Amino acid sequence: MHVEQDSAYHLRPATEADVPALRDLIARSIHALGAGDYTPEQIDAALTGTFGVDTALIRDATYFAVATADGRIVGCGGWSRRRTLFGGDAREQRDDTVLDPAREPAKIRAFFIDPDHARRGLGRRILAHCEAQAVAAGFRAFELMATLPGQRLYAACGYMPGEGVVHPLPGGQSIAFVPMSKRAP
């Protein structure tokens, strides 16, 4: 499997051993980078299952970590050949059915960047890697469920928004997402 490197960051497949660091990264990322779009209560409720690690992606070798030279994980994201569009292991509505790449889009999943490393091109780097891998697996299109802060990255990378949705969360909370899609080049 191809991995990308530069002097400051290393893109590699995520492993089961990374799960605790990924959980911490996801929480830090959404608390800081999502604060302008979501309330603290929404973020905390979303971290109970909507935002989280999906170990099926790790087992499928389609989830990636960006690490610093000293090994600290500062970014993550992936793609999936399975029907589930978003959510971590704790999310109840999961469908691990394998998609038909000739007629169904690959799912772009669970992108989070460390706030101290934001705006350095890490999200774009992971996204380009995921899209290239999905195309190599035969997919011709991609779809995702964007957080409001993530929507800006995906739009800048050519994804078209659909009609926003409101997803229910525990404790009477809800959170806004934007479905987005893109055809492969």
Image (spheres, helix red, strand yellow):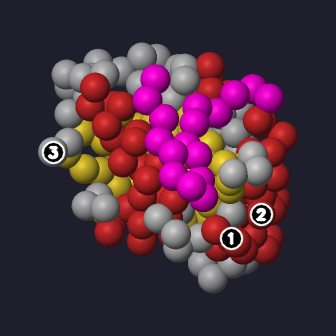
Q: Residues within 10 Å of mark 3 (few under 14, many from 20)?
A: few
Residue 105, how many percent across, how many down?
29, 34
Q: Residues within 10 Å of mark 1 (few under 14, many from 20)?
A: some
N-terminal of the pair, mark 3 or mark 1, is: 1
Circles 1 and 2 in contact, beta carbons < 8 Å:
yes
Q: Is residue 16 magenta?
A: yes
Residue at position x 42%, y 66% in the image:
153
**CA distance for labels 1 and 2:** 7 Å
The quarter of the picture where the C terminus appears is top left
Residue 60, how many percent across, how many down?
55, 20
Between 160 and 164, the residue placed more toward the observer is 160
In the rendered structure, which segment of residues is drawn in magenta? 1-17
Which residue extends farthest bottom? 36
Residue at position x 55%, y 24% in the image:
61
Residue at position x 68%, y 53% in the image:
68
* Residue that numbered label 1 is attached to: 115
Q: Is residue 110 magenta?
A: no
Q: Amino acid at mark 2?
A: Arg
**CA distance for labels 2 and 3:** 33 Å
* Residue that numbered label 2 is attached to: 28
